[in-house]
Amino acid sequence: MVIGRPVISGLSGRTWLTTAGVYLASYILLQYSGLPGPRPENIMRVLHTWPAMTGVAALLLAGVSRSYALRSGQDSAVPGGGRFTRGRLSLWGMLLFGAGLLLSSLTRIEGSVTLSEGQEVSLSSGGFDSGTLYRRSFSKEPEGSLLVAEVSQFISDKGRAKRMYEAGALYSGTGKGPLDLRLNSLYPRFAGGFMFEIKDAGYSPHVFLFDPAGNMIDNFYAVLQLSPPGAEDSFRFDRIIPHTIYLKYYPEASLFPDAAAASGIKSGPLFKVRIARNLDVVADRYAAPDDAVYFDKLVFSAGDMRKWVEVRIVRDPGIYLLFPGVILMVIGALSHLLKSPESLA
């Protein structure tokens, strides 16, 4: 008996490695299937659960054993001088992945804030949108505030929906004065140890409800998903009337010939308004901004239009170890599959 030889070796090490990997992948797929409950917000929240952490621990144990077998020459399936290199890459990758996941499970914080142009919010836990805050035991909250100065147009000059949302923002949590951030929906920006990226975007029309005498009953900016043009969303004047108001928005009627022809409005912003009381449609027409739409002895209008963005904010020191670990594991796996001609002889 050789002192120090791992309990799991050779073929059994490969079996354990495969079993642990299949278990972890199956658990992740099960969570995303929606069978146990609502689908997770992102994969990190899945990996932080104890079943996933158990699978990762088993994967690490099997990986260490496998690497030892490759380095010591016990695995005859992988002959030649490349054994130690491949084993070392996989081992370091698994160790970094495990350490990064452990650190992430202790320190990650994430949440979203929805802001219209010109709106500012304090980035304490109370400043995040309801239901979006996710934090671990040793997480650090962002400081300062975030101001969305402007949001780029959602359509091109030809009326086509853009694939990327963009916004200019000011972040004041670095301690060095406001920092100008150019945010987008493709990749995050980093500031003060936090990542900022646009998760969603849309329009906020200023909506009004009047009585027959012209007295205003209620008004507010409705946060709606009306992009791309022609997309329909709805809202209600809660606890005031039982009606549901459905809106479509066309930023420039001349770019949408069908809507312009149906409305008789050739240029400028255009709304398609549909108002329903239970199952009955009581109004269905096109309207320019501030036009009056009459229904059931009431008057509805939509005026000033603002753009809004939902900004996702994340701080997770563990990802700086986790992602390099994944890259090393992939390289190690590929180098094992793509063996040198000498090893195939």
Image: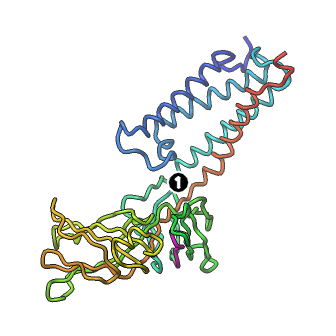
Count of numbered marks: 1
Magenta-span inclusion, residue 150 = yes
Q: Given the image, on which type of amino acid does mark 1 rest?
A: Arg
What quarter of the picture does the C terminus occupy?
A: top right
**Residue at the disc numbered 1:** 108
Q: Residue furthest top?
A: 1
Classed neighbour count for the residue bearing mark 1: other residues with Cα under 10 Å, few (<14), some (14–19), many (≥20):
many
Magenta-span inclusion, residue 108 = no
The kind of secondary structure element at disc 1 is: loop
Magenta-colored span: 149-154
Residue drawn at point x = 36 percent, y = 45 percent: 38
Residue drawn at point x = 44 percent, y = 55 percent: 134
Does 60 sit left or right of 338 as displayed? left
Does 69 sit left or right of 243 as displayed? right
- Can you say whether 130 is above or below 294 in the image? above
Does 267 sit left or right of 218 as displayed? right
Q: Is residue 172 visible?
A: no
The quadrant in which residue 238 appears is bottom left
**What x and y, as percent, mark residue 213?**
14, 89
**Of 325 and 289, the residue lying toward us:** 289
- Can you say whether 143 is above or below 65 in the image? below
**Of 184 and 23, the residue lying toward us:** 184
